[in-house]
Image (cartoon, rainbow, N blue to C red):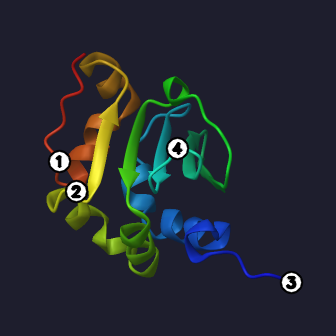
Amino acid sequence: MVKPVKIHDNNLWDKFVSDSEQYFAVLSPGTKVAFFVGETDKNFLLIERTEGAIDSKFNVNSSLNMMETDLFFTIAEDDASELLDDASKLSNFIKEGKLGIFCLVDDVVMAEKGLDKLLNNLGFAPSCAI
């Protein structure tokens, strides 16, 4: 059996989400956040806040209509690998500019979905006005 590339390992991403749960717990049910890893949009972690849970799945060579998410991040493969080693680096990655941030909702919906709290807790002064 071939071992998956580290950044494609769904178990490591599940651990990352679990270790970062305090950030995603502020989201309202139905809110979707994605992390696109690497230079294409084919490898991504999709996090969805459901009633009483935070669901996540890492997708390899897949597709996602970005408009179906509320917020997405972009991250280089090397940085993603580092993040999988230590989820506590997430807020530092934002401060260091290692995460691209794209919000697809306006400020009102952002507040309704808890995205403003998520970004604020990560140390990013949020405004998604479009």
N-terminal-most mark, 4 or 3: 3
SS of the residue under disc 1: loop
Q: Tell me residue 119's x, y (percent).
A: 26, 45
Indicate the amino acid at tag 1: Phe
Q: What residue is at 25 percent from the left and 63 percent from the top?
A: 93
Q: Which residue lies furthest to the front in this view?
A: 39
Nearer to the camera, 54 or 47: 47
- Marks 1/2 in contact by CB < 8 Å: the verdict is yes
Q: Position of residue 17 (x, y in %)?
A: 51, 62
Residue indicated by mark 3: 1
Q: Mark 2 points at which residue?
A: 94
Under circle 2, the secondary element is helix
Q: Which mark is residue 112?
A: none
Real-space CA distance between mark 1 and mark 2, rounded to the nearest whole angstrom: 7 Å
Q: Mark 4 points at which residue?
A: 41
Query: Distance of mark 2 from mark 3, alpha carbons?
Result: 36 Å
Secondary structure at badge 4 equals loop
Near-viewer residue (121 or 68): 68
Three-letter residue code for mark 4? Asp
Q: Please name the residue shown 30% across and 27% down the image.
A: 111
Amino acid carrying label 2: it is Ile
Q: Which of marks 2 and 4 is in front?
A: 4
Left or right of 34, for residue 88:
left
